[in-house]
Amino acid sequence: MFNKTLNFLIVSLFLSLTSIAQAVVIEAEGQAIIANKNITAAREAAIRDASQQASMQAAVYVSSSQVVRDGILEIDNMQISSLGQVSNIEILDEKIIGSTLHIRIKANVDIDEGCSNGSSNNYKKTIAFAAFPLQQLSQANLGGLHNVSSELPAQLSQRFNSTAQTITYNAGLINLYPNPSQASSSQLDSGKLTSMLSTIGQLDVNYVISGVIRDISMVDPRTHAENNYFMDLYNRLDFKSKRHLRNFEIDLFIHDGFSGQLVSQKHYQTAGLWSLDRTITTGFATPGFIKQDYGQKVRALEDKIAAEISAELRCEPFSTRITQVEDRTIWINAGKQHGLKRGDKLTIYRSSTIFTPQMNSNTQLTNTQQTLIIDDVQMGFASGHINASAETYNIRAGDLAIAR
């Protein structure tokens, strides 16, 4: 019973903490009151307390952005976080003193060393998923996968939401690429989300994820094009053969939701067995689709995409739009659901539009050196104050508050 309890605690701690980096061995003590003579419950609580102490000892770090004004170093937006992941717990000593159980443990603690760019905020980024148009529409005929362009972003949105690190919006009916074959991995129109911002701008999302489905064809196109009855029958009976492999290849683009600039681009590819008769239609992401080996491979790739991009965006700055300004008080379009709390500090950036010699517009952000201190937090918005009048620094609605 004791071993099962200990294993349960280890697994629970492993699942509840994230971000693995460097492991250290820590000894720590924990204690718990013995209630109703229940030693087992007290032992569980004491192990949990000792594990938390080990995590704190190994993984407490202080991160701050620093600003020098008039030769004086000011510490801005200080955060203390415990990021230790505890595993391999070994009980070194256990004793009862009065009505309290004391336990000493030794455990491995994996420390998250933070982001290489120095980012330390844990706010939830907001993401909108636009359509993933299919480059060759005829490839959707096999299996009736014509809904793939709108359903793929819906599936990705669900997987990102399950990470609990993002707030996602499904904009799968918005197509950024009317001609997918000409969609560049380095630009969208003039490098901006001009075709989309007017429609999706009211969402005020941090990032827009879109893409193009390059290929969902059979690896061997002859598999479902055989006119000979006996050869066709053989192909269908030999459903585990590699001749039934089907491609799934996409280009994925991440754009900044406020400026429209390209943040990152990715290429993903997988393949799986598609053994259904060519007359059978399932649609994309349906139960019939998922039963196929091909469907399982696509789902695994979606999980991989969600994990990789969530990790990448975790280290990107958190931005939110200023919605209202009144003297020293500023309201922003982010709140409790994004992880904001009273006392948090964000830097105010003034947003302006500049034009290139080719008359392409770009968004320019200028650091006002003003810190917004959050005073009140609601579910979807918050307000705070700066130390000077917003008018002095020409701060207005539409500017951004950023935490790095």
Image: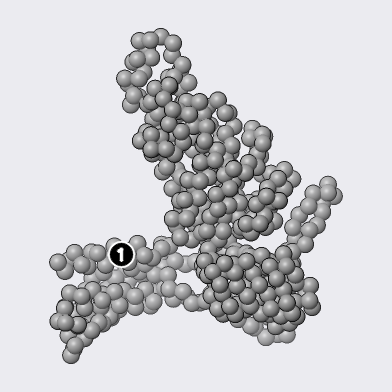
Where is 144 relative to 322, above or below?
above
Q: Secondary structure at mark 1?
A: helix
Q: Quadrant of residue 71?
A: bottom right
Q: Residue at x 41, y 25 (%)?
A: 280
User: Residue at point 53% right, 63% down?
Assistant: 124
**Residue 35 screen position, x and y as percent:** 19, 82
62 left or right of 245 in image: right
Quadrant for the C terminus in the image: bottom right
Reading the image, the residue beneath label 1 is 12
Which residue of the protein is positioned furthest toward the bottom in this rendering?
Answer: 98
Q: Residue at x 74, y 79 (%)?
A: 327
Q: Position of residue 70 (x, y in %)?
A: 73, 85
Q: Is residue 270 above or below residue 12?
A: above
| Residue 88 picture quarter | bottom left
**Three-letter amino acid code at the position of disc 1:** Ser
Residues packed near mark 1 inside 10 Å, few (<14), some (14 to 19) or many (20 plus):
some
Is residue 264 something that shows in the picture?
Answer: no
